[in-house]
Amino acid sequence: MTGKQWTNASAVLGILAGVGAIAGGLVAHSRQPVFGIPQFFGIHSNLFSGVHVLVGIGIVMVVGGALTFKWPSVGAVIVCLAAMIGLVYTYNRGQYRWTPLLWYWGAPWVFAWLAGIAAGYAAYKNVPQIDEKLSDARPNHSAG
Amino acid sequence: MLRNEGLKRVRMRLITAVIFVFTLTCSGSFGMEDVVSSSGPGMTLIMILVLPFVWSVPLAFVSSELGSMVPEAGGLYRWIRRGMGEYWSFQAGWWWSLSLYVDSAVYVSLALDYMQNKWGFGGGERAAIGIAIVAVFTFINIRGLELTGWTLTIIQIGVMVPLLVFTVWGVLAGSGNPFSPVLVPHETILSSMNLGLAIMMWMYSGWESMSTLAGEIENPQRIIPRALMLGTPLVIITYFITVYAAIRVANADTGWANMGTGTGSLDFVSLAQYLGGTVFAYFMLLAAILSNIGLYAGYLATGARPQFQMARDRLLPRFLGYTHPRWGTPLVAILLMGIVNAILINMTFDALITIDVFLLMFAYVLIYLTVVIMRYKEPDTPRSFRVPLPSWGLCIWVAFPIAIAIFALFTNGTDYLIGGLTAVLTGPIAYLVFKNIYKGTTDAALEGATITATGERTDFGTEVEGVGA
């Protein structure tokens, strides 16, 4: 695959991660309107519930995925960072049992990781490696 | 003396290499007490004998084959680069190093816990002693592998002498059949194994670590595989005889069900107290402290090397690749790890420990995949050690530890799962950031490469092969 193809794959996977998070948020909302403890550093608001975080982080991931088409490294970093923040935030909001977490965060996490891998391959293809040894390297096989 | 990347190669005797391997994979049996009470005495002894064949022996053999084929500084990072390319080698090096940054600090904390419980000093003294331990072993590591090897030898004598006396005494003075009962009463085989398996996998890890020192040892492609082959049975025997004796002593005391490392439980120190009184208990306490300090010294040595090599391959900040001008060791990588350890041991870092198992397991899976890929991709590249199995047999054999590693990811609890999943995502992020800044190095321009991209020995590789052969 070419660098451009890896870039496109990464972008699509990033958008899928976001869609997965948004879908997870909507499913969670239909079952449990406020998913998790809706507070953040003492501020109580439904905006801080697990449902809103899933949807909010999902939107960020979709934007990150879209940015990946143009800037693969920047977009994929946004997608992966969003998945990390969302996962830790939801866990710290009282979702200590792993089943609901895996249910709602499973797809976003997997797609975000795959988006990161595809972006990594795109970077490997697009960023030319340096073809000379470090200038301060000592002779490779000198007796010392 | 051969040099690559400014590293100085030292002539390491086989016995020293075996002590390195023993330290990194065992360093005494402290911690096994929890397995006995959670899995049952018989099951513990059976797992000590059986688990290595599906968990640690594959890793030891695979590390030997890959280490004899690609005997380069950075070890597993360079193997995976050769088999799976730059991206996955960066991931493995990153995950493995991140894991060891936390892991090595845990050993100092455990040593400090033993001291604090015994002598009851305050937080200030604890911090000062911890920083002193880190500073001493950071210096020893920067000074070179010769001094590190001597230090580990002395430490392991201090660990093993009390344990061996305990073993002989315990077998003679203890009571009961250590294999009975096999399981914890009213528990199934699976539930009995659950916690015990996680601990034992941890106790049987570390076989790949020695490989990272390959750039600083003369003739690493021969010394390291031999040390791994000798170290494997040594570790199994050490665990078996010491735990066998401990169960007999516990049976003579309040019973195996009370064995454990928590307060009031029967650990090796309290069992030594029962057996030989206060003086013997002091020796055992010293052994437990030395065991953890030895693990720290070993992992500080091996943990710093992949980052060094990644920096030399232009995948991490260049300063991490600086070596000591006189002693030829990765100065900045070791120093950075020591500084992070000194900070961590003075903080509550329970949350960070959760990333440990997950990251290490992911790196292990990549090592297993690499050995299989290399069998098919480069079947004719010279290997002074080869796992005595055909390629399809090797595939089946490594499937067991991969399955166990994946199983372990889900058995350590939610916090470990979340911590691990989060930490895994730092790998792609780090690669994207550092790749765009530093670009990486082509295979042809890699320093210290022993084989070319087409599988032929480089001039450097020929000289490495020749030294001490």
Image: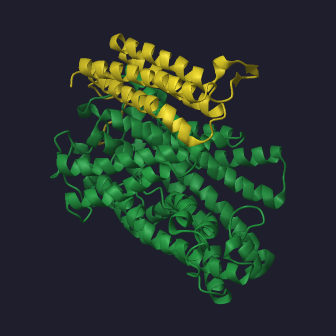
Chain colours: A yellow, B green
In the shown orientation, is residue B435 left or right of residue B48? left
With respect to residue A24, does A140 lie above or below?
below
Q: Residue A142 at what x, y percent from top left?
A: 31, 42
Image vertical order of residue B194 relative to residue B340, above or below: below
The residue drawn where x is 39% and y is 12% is A67
Residue at x 40% of width, y 29% of height: A111
Q: Tell me if I can see residue B281 in this picture.
A: yes
Name the residue located 65 percent from the left edge and 46 percent from the top edge: B134
What is the number of callouts on the image? 0
Residue B456 point in image, percent of width and height:
17, 45
Residue B226 spot, x, y in % from top left: 35, 65
Q: Nearer the viewer, residue A62 or B360?
A: A62
In the rendered image, which quarter is residue B223 located in?
bottom left
Q: Is residue A60 above or below residue B70?
A: above
Visible residue check, residue B329? no
Which quadrant would residue B138 be assigned to in this image?
A: top right
Quadrant position of the C terminus of chain B in the picture: bottom left
Q: Residue at x 46, y 27 (%)?
A: B317
- The residue nearer to you, when weighing B111 against A22, is A22
What residue occupies the far front of the structure in this picture? A30
Q: Nearer the viewer, residue B71 or A23?
A: A23
Find residue A130 and report its horizontal and vertical position in percent: 29, 23
Relative side of B255 to B296, left or right: right
